[in-house]
Image: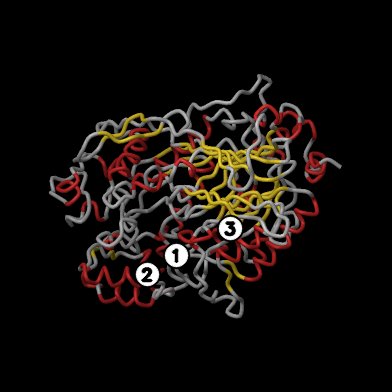
Amino acid sequence: MPRTRSVTKAAADIDRRTVLAATGALTGTAAIAGVGHLLGPGGHKAAAGPVPAQALTREVPEVSAAPRVPYTRGTTLASVATGHGSGFRRLGDGPAWPRVVRSDLRAARSGRAARRTALAAFVQFTDLHLVDVQHPLRYEYLRSQTSSAWRPQESLSVAGAVALVERVNALRGAPVTAAPLHFVMTTGDNTDNNARCELDWFLTAMSGGRITPNTGDPRHYEGVQNSGIPLYWHPDSALRDTDKRDHRFPRLDGFLAAAISEVRSPGLNLPWYSTVGNHDALPGGCYAPGDSYFAELAVGGRKLMDLPAAQAKAIWDNVKQGGDPRGREFERLLRSQARHMRAVTPDESRAPFTPAEYVAAHLDPARTGPGPVGHGYTQANLAAKTQYYTFRVSDDVIGISLDSTDPGGHYEGSLGTAQLTWLTAQLKAAERNGDHAVVFSHHTSRTMRNLNKDPGHPAERRHGGDELAALLAAHRPVLAWVNGHSHKNAITPHQGTGGSHGFWEISTASHVDFPQLARIIEITDNHDGTLSLFTTLIESSAPHRTDFSDLSQTGLAALYRELAFNAPGSRATLSGTPGDRNTELVLRK
């Protein structure tokens, strides 16, 4: 029986005419874009029952009767933000990035463009890092050791994320095939400090609503950017901080007030799914959760903003080496610095959230937006205390979302044996059903080297990226492993084993560091024994050119990009090589 019918049958309680009205007409893969039923950690349908009709009608992209044609507008195939000048460099329109055909796994055959048909198309967001910049647990004082500890643009992360939502809403479909986009997947680090306020901002940005990215005192900002400490850019002050002195950062009166003002998100007009990252689960993105001291500090009224360079180096070196996964040394440092902490306004919304609370927040009906309910997570995940699941992407493709965060601590990841066993079963089922599979995780194969024991399952082994890549390479359904974490564009071929065709690992740059990108991925059948995966990078909807006097929501989103471009310590290599950007990735069918 065609899968179109089986999906419709799975939603039997939904009136058929409602489905037809939502799709325009039931015509192949496009007709079920976004309809996919969720499969929980045991491979069963969600215990919550069928998707409500209202949610389903919003899940399905409108199918236009007009012919669809490929396009470049709004993508990096048309233009890319490029810097000009010296000192604090201004951004403007730059040359487009071309599409590169990669035949590492299979030779591309001539005439395929005329033969190909679309199997699926979706958008990947990753590493949004919606950040409460006033949070007491932040370690901005490590900026002298790592640029990731504090960024001048961070206070505008919400405005930047909303501009990315606006970009996706304006897309006409998939750039190459012009097929309707099925969904958006976020591959983790949706939040920065594992804080409830940040989770609220993320869910609102994705599903729509008003966000005030401010905590503590509702009247004004309290943090490092008005602290008088020269280590940080003070936009509203005449202070000759290091960013103004050494990098010619501007003075922008009214910046901090604008940064904590209300932002309005239209919400995505596509269904969206969520994958968890280490910053969504661990304090600071690297320490094992559950420490009562960290929880109390997070909601309390004291914040450390400065630290001698020698102590900053010692703590950061320890973090890099994975020497303090439970945060004991970090806690001792903070306790020793108690008298140097500054007073801030306490705020309960800064409390850390647990994995169960993360799942429950996604399941909140008020957060459904365009659907699906739970955005991948189900009541089965809550019952099993898991954060991994499968879902149907289209008639021929399933998605598999993994939880690569190690509860034992450290910013690199791994999988437990139970999850690896579950994943193996899903891949075998996909092979039996004749499905293709796209696997999603936060961590890359090269950043899954952390095998710290899970405190909740101390007898369970942890499995790294090499082992996961070998498993995926041995199963024919796997076309792609889509991830983030590294904040860098990289596309890596993995050769197949045992008759498998191999797969492409597609890692995408973050939306907090320049060049602040997301990625469209299209899957096509070339009808010549090969498949092609097309990857196309997109920027947010914010204009490339920034007007310092424009502190509107759009102006702040543009400034978010320009500040990221100029951030001290930023890496020019994060955009990757041409073969990591806009590509056609060929593999055997």
Secondary element type, mark 3:
helix
**Label 1, residues with CA under 10 Å away: few <14, some 14-19, many ≥20:** many
Residue 411 numbered tag: 1
Question: x, y percentage for residue 315?
Answer: 31, 71
First in residue order: circle 1 vs circle 2: 2
Q: Position of residue 436 (x, y in %)?
A: 71, 48
Please tell me in which quadrant of the rendered image residue 327 appears: bottom left
Pointer 1 with pointer 2, Cβ within 8 A: yes
- Quadrant into which the N terminus falls: top right
Q: Nearer the viewer, residue 542 or 356?
A: 542
Q: Amino acid at mark 1?
A: Tyr
View extreme (right): residue: 1
Structural distance between the alpha carbons of marks 1 and 2: 9 Å
Q: Position of residue 402 (x, y in %)?
A: 60, 58
Q: Is residue 125 left or right of residue 11?
A: left
Q: Secondary structure at mark 1?
A: loop
The Cα–Cα distance between marks 2 and 3, rounded to whole angstroms, is 28 Å
Q: Residues within 10 Å of mark 3 (few under 14, many from 20)?
A: many
Mark 3 vs 1, N-terminal side: 3
The answer to whether 134 is drawn above or below residue 465 in the figure is above
Q: CA distance from mark 3 to mark 1?
A: 21 Å
Residue type pointed to by label 2: Val
Numbered mark located on residue 359 in the image: 3
Residue at the (64%, 71%) spot, across then down: 417
Q: Indicate the secondary structure of the residue bearing disc 2.
A: helix
Q: Which residue is mark 2?
A: 319
